[in-house]
Image: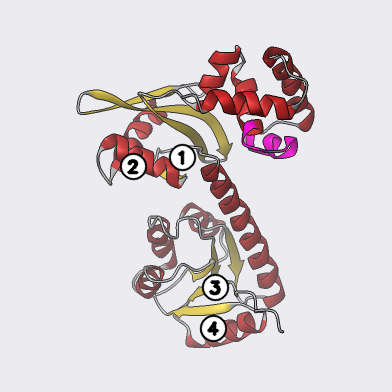
Amino acid sequence: MAEPALPRDIVLLVDDSAEALGFMTDALEQSGFSVLIATSGTAALGIVERITPDLILLDAVMPGMDGFETCRRLKANAAVAQVPVVFMTGLTETEHVVHALESGGVDYLSKPINIDELRARIRVHLRNARSAQSARIALDAAGRHLLAVKGDGAIHWSTPQATRLVNAAMGSDDGMEIVARHIAGWMRDRVAAVRDGIISIAHAGQAALQLAFLGAIGPDEYLFRLTAASQRSDDEVLRQRFSLTQRESEVLLWIAKGKANRDIGEILGLSARTVNKHLEQIYVKLGVENRASAAVKATHVLYEM
């Protein structure tokens, strides 16, 4: 019995040149990709309302809405905000490259396009996008209410659990817009050296949400953890019950969720050696000898809540 064929990655190709579309479509399909075609920025925006591509190849120079504006509008659509956009154009001046990247593109290819180089870059960006998506899914599955913003406070991404928490706390489906405004104000006023910060957001005269600033995770990406104002976060519960440091409580929480040391190190930005050092202190404070016993104790405390 033949094995079912693996689904093909979908590439949205946006170019107003029929010749370029024909050449690129043939090359991409021969490379194993499924290709969607748009001859204008407006058409591209319409397509992504119905189908989410895995990657977008975008001509910068088109009549009407150019590629830069098209990219900005694509990035404003939450459904495709994380889809990598690679610009293709004959414009090679530095200012054009900068413009493309500032518009939300992840890469820039000069025409005429070298197909071998294009294939290689597509695969790299697809791999990176999948890694980022997997990380967000893992965080959400672990019950992490996280969101990331840009330097101006605009929402970059959020885990689905964070979105649900915000909307429930604010009593509105557009709760994220309210949160974004508060974060934008905090980002403008914060001191660059500040590493820890709490933003409290009220709704109907009552404290509704607390956002804890966790730090910068990219050149223009800042991470926040959300909790309902009436609730303590899981790691705070562990920290208070066992007299742990904040980092020890975070390590213990991931131990309780079944993560290996290597995974914990990647999630928290720690070396394996540092994770082990924290575990040594955790075992002492919990009065246990191994990670299994620590996980059982932590889980018992969390399910008492």
Residue designated by label 3: 10
Which residue is the extreme one toward the left? 204
Residue depicted at 62% across the width and 15% down the height: 244
Percent coordinates x, y for residue 92 in the rendering: 57, 65
What's the CA distance linking mark 4 and mark 2? Answer: 40 Å
Label 1 sits on a secondary structure element that is strand
Q: Nearer the viewer, residue 270 or 190?
A: 270
Would you say the residues marked 4 and 2 are in contact, meaning their CB atoms lie under 8 Å apart?
A: no
Badge 2: how crowded within 10 Å, few (<14), some, or many (20+)? many
Image depth: mark 4 or mark 2 in front: 2
Earlier along the polypeptide chain: callout 3 or callout 1?
A: 3
Q: Is 252 contained in the magenta span?
A: no
Which amino acid is tagged 4? Answer: Ala
The magenta segment is 256-268
Earlier along the polypeptide chain: callout 4 or callout 2?
A: 4
Label 3 sits on a secondary structure element that is strand
* In this rendering, position of residue 206 left or right of residue 132: left
Label 4 sits on a secondary structure element that is helix
Would you say the residues marked 3 and 1 are in contact, meaning their CB atoms lie under 8 Å apart?
A: no
Earlier along the polypeptide chain: callout 3 or callout 4?
A: 3
Residue designated by label 1: 147
Q: Which mark is residue 176?
A: 2
What's the CA distance linking mark 2 and mark 1? Answer: 10 Å
Residue depicted at 48% across the width and 56% down the height: 99
